[in-house]
Image (tube, rainbow, N blue to C red):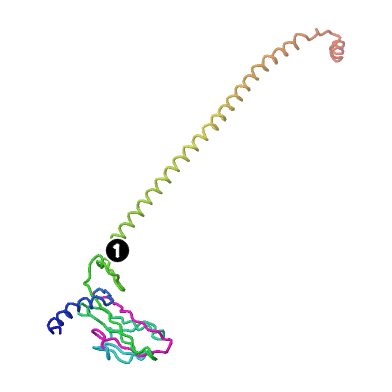
Amino acid sequence: MMHPQVLISGLLLLLPAAVDSFPQVHGVMGHPVTLPCTYPVSNGLSSMCWGRGACASDKCGQTLIWTDGHRIYYRTNNRYQLKGQLLRGDVSLTIENVTESDSGLYCCRVEMKGWNGVQRLTTSLQVQPVYTDTVTSSHRPWNNHTEVVPTPNPLKIHTKGLYIGISVSVVLLLLTSILMIIKCRHMRKKRKPEVSSRCGSIVFHDYKKKAFESIVQPQAKDIDYVIEDNLPPRTDSQLPSKMTSFQDWR
């Protein structure tokens, strides 16, 4: 027969392994955490309870909240909530604003209708302190975890946006100035040929006029001289009749 001390020592050695075998949920201080628990509703809704500690054979342990499947009839603290869809068998426990003292084992006990009997589920909750950057992840999968990331300084964001706006305005101003300078130079180059062509036409017209006058005036003088040279000598017979009568009178 095995000695009792040996049996007790063996049970103590197996106890940590039994605790580790429970599904674990990790939470962060000051944040809500949810312990999952569901049951099939094919045979109807069932009453259930959540308790502190491992599930016993006939009770939830230290009862925290109890429901008949439709509504909550008992709870020890408003931090304990059933936010799942009760009519679909979702009786997951949500603990608001968790603290380190909330770490430990929790029992979900559902009194199933029919031949299935009682459904029990023990879950281990591990609450960790708040980190300034991120929560260090565990090697084991988490059912619920929260990350806290420091928010950026709004003053730095505003200053950065102001610098970007000023830079864009300066670039637009420079581009506008360059376009105006190019346009002005183009207009000046376009006006210079028009002025020179006008001046050339005026000079050519004046020169043409003077050349025409220099040719016409000598010809006019030659014509006068020709007319005077070709005049026939006047005779007395060509004098008027009045002159003849005057001589007769004398």
Instruction: Name the image quarter holding the N terminus.
Output: bottom left
Q: Position of residue 100 (x, y in %)?
A: 20, 77
Q: In the figure, 88 relative to 133: above or below?
A: below
Q: Which residues are magenta?
A: 29-56
Given residues 101 and 189, the one toward you in this image is 101
- Where is 105 relative to 190, above or below? below
Q: Is residue 205 above or below residue 91?
A: above
Residue 224 vertical position relative to residue 28 in the rendered view, above or below: above
Q: Residue at x 46, y 37 (%)?
A: 185
Picture quadrant where residue 175 is located: top left
Q: Is residue 48 magenta?
A: yes
Hey, which quadrant is residue 159 in on the image? bottom left
Q: Residue at x 80, y 8 (%)?
A: 232
| Amino acid tagged 1 | Pro
Find the residue positioned furthest to the front. 1
Instruction: Judge left or right: residue 234 versus residue 67.
Output: right
Left or right, 85 with reference to 66: right
Q: Position of residue 92 (x, y in %)?
A: 33, 81
Alpha-carbon neighbours of circle 1 within 10 Å: few (<14), some, or many (≥20)? Answer: few
The one of 105 and 117 positioned closer to us in this rendering: 117
Q: Position of residue 50 (x, y in %)?
A: 29, 86
Judged from the image, the secondary structure of the residue bearing numbered disc 1 is helix
| Residue receiving disc 1 | 154
- Asked if residue 45 is among those painted magenta in the image, a careful observer would answer yes
